[in-house]
Amino acid sequence: MTNSAKNSPNKPGLKLKLEDEMRKALALTLYFGIWFCAITFMATTALEERPIPLTLFGFALIKAGLSAKFMLIAQAAYPIKVDKEHGIVGPLFVESIVYIVVIIALNYIEAGVDGLIHGKEFITSMAAFGSGDPLRVLAMSIVYWLIVWPYLIFVGFNKVVGNTETLAVLFGSKK
């Protein structure tokens, strides 16, 4: 298929939307994956574990994929709204808190489903999320927020100025 046929306006809307969602999911998974692998690396070196088990990075990438999925679900349920006249930081801050609440709630549900898969009770498994420690869940929430915040600023900026201008600002103009 040629590029002109590939980008034709006759392309089915559903297929185009699916491709766009897949690109978003891949980009967000890579973004989260870099963060989660860095955190995993830091944690294993802090524990002075040698050799560093590579399977931990696989788990970090799986968690990145799940977190990306949860983030996209949150964005579908509560779309990002920005207004150039009022700036993007204030509205995105509120939305970032909503997204973190959704992501943490979905993580609790994921823990419950994982428990069911392994023959445990759903509620008991949910309660075990974050080792059942509210401070640990709060710490994870703060780290998630610190990861999500730059992504939301990028998405908000992109919505206000457009993809071409965003890429030009970040990587320079192609002219």
Image (spheres, rainbow, N blue to C red):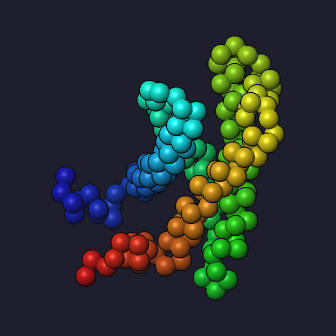
Percent of width and height locating residue 108: 73, 36
Q: Looking at the image, which residue is at 61% across and 61% down?
A: 149
Q: Nearer the viewer, residue 17 or 120?
A: 120
Percent of width and height locating residue 171: 36, 72
Percent of width and height locating residue 105: 73, 42
Number of dots carrying numbers: 0
Q: Looking at the image, which residue is at 50% across and 40% down?
A: 41
User: Which quarter of the figure has residue 140?
Assistant: top right
Q: Looking at the image, which residue is at 33% across and 65% down?
A: 9
Query: From this viewpoint, which residue is outermost toward the top?
Result: 119
User: Which quarter of the figure has residue 111?
Assistant: top right
| Above or below, 56 relative to 41 | above
Q: Is residue 63 visible?
A: no
Please identify the quadrant where the C terminus is shown: bottom left
| Above or below, 16 relative to 112 | below
Percent of width and height locating residue 54: 43, 29
Q: Is residue 129 visible?
A: yes
Is 147 displayed left or right of 20 in the figure?
right
Query: From this viewpoint, which residue is outermost toward the left?
Result: 2
Q: Nearer the viewer, residue 132 or 52?
A: 52
